[in-house]
Image: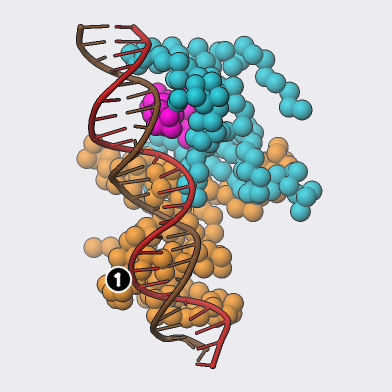
Chain colours: A orange, B cyan, C brown, D red
Amino acid sequence: MKPKEPANLTEERVSRILAKVREHDFRLTPQRLAIIRILAESKDHPSADEIYQEVRALFPTTSVATVYKTIALLKELNEVLELGFPDGSNRYDGNRPYPHPHAICTKCRKIMDPKISNVEELSEEMKKKTGYRFSFHRLDFFGLCPECQKKS
Amino acid sequence: MKPKEPANLTEERVSRILAKVREHDFRLTPQRLAIIRILAESKDHPSADEIYQEVRALFPTTSVATVYKTIALLKELNEVLELGFPDGSNRYDGNRPYPHPHAICTKCRKIMDPKISNVEELSEEMKKKTGYRFSFHRLDFFGLCPECQKKS
DNA sequence: CTTCATGCAAAACATTTGCAGCTGG
DNA sequence: CCAGCTGCAAATGTTTTGCATGAAG
């Protein structure tokens, strides 16, 4: 049993995203609302297909295209973070849509988002050494999660 | 004009990789040798397709499959680093096959590899907070390179 | 010689696109 | 009402796979 976050946190996320959607004059369809809700509720970085399956449970005629288009919309509004992997699998984080470090299990694919200190320092150092002007970053650590360590 | 690395550095990489290929009893075909050489010579993180085009110039009958199989082989031997992106494009680094930070231009796609300090500290902090046992990481900063900043 | 690698084409996947019809505001 | 969204299916782009032929050791 995973301890559920208080509902009001989810609701806060949902209404923040809805506000932004309206603010940009995008339409609020039932499918979009469902996808937004799924992303705001999930703590486990779902894939596009997982989102698709969940929406289907509510709106059986929904197509993958709509899921991808909605995700694209949310990316544009900076309200979802896309985590793409070399094997083609994408995972989405609708709760922390800004760059942050991930701990990713290479066996069960579980992703954790601990808060850690001063990635900004590194960014500053990179900027000085390269002359680039950075707008975002990606920091992932790969290995075995505690459960998978026990099993191996 | 980019200053060419001394040829012996490339040769060092090539023979290190060749040694490892032989050591693991994999065959040394002309195609593999060509791909290894391309990776060792390149300073610019080529894509699979770019490697394919280069090999084709030398061995016109070479297939993409061979390129991918050879890359897979080199990944297995830890002699190439694969950088996958959400859009499906992959880039390869045959010179620094261990995790290291990248500065990636979001416009022209140029990649730089500056050496920066203490990513290990972050790794340690992540380990303490998550209980994961990490084996590698990925750290990329995205933004505009100096040239693209001027143009914009 | 024998096994492994190659090359071709087809398959596999995730994502995108074109378009007719539907619907939110 | 009508611009924008949906759903379907076909297209896309990249990587993988099956299998007959060829070459490394």
Label 1: state its secondary structure.
Answer: helix
Which residue shows up at 37% across the image and 65% down it?
A: A64
Q: Position of residue A101 (x, y in %)?
A: 49, 50
Which residue shows up at 59% across the image and 77% down it?
A: A24
* Side of A21 where D20 appears, left or right: left
Q: Nearer the viewer, residue A76 or A120?
A: A76
Quick check: A141 above or below A69? Answer: above
Badge 1 crowding class, 10 Å Cα cut-off, few under 14, some 14 to 19, many 20 or more, is some
Residue B64 magenta: yes
Q: Position of residue D1 (x, y in %)?
A: 54, 93
Q: Chain of mark 1?
A: A
* Side of A21 where D25 appears, left or right: left
* Side of A54 where C24 appears, left or right: right
Q: Position of residue A25 (x, y in %)?
A: 58, 80
Which residue shows up at 43% across the image and 43% down it?
A: A86
Residue B85 magenta: no
In this view of the protein, can residue A37 be seen by the observer? Answer: no
Residue indicated by mark 1: A56
- State which region is magenta: B63-82
| Location of residue C3 (image quadrant) | top left
Please identify the residue farthest to the right as the structure is shown: B150
Quick check: C21 above or below C2? Answer: below
Which residue shows up at 50% across the image and 30% down it?
A: B52
Residue type at mark 1 is Arg
In this view of the protein, can residue A88 be seen by the observer? Answer: yes
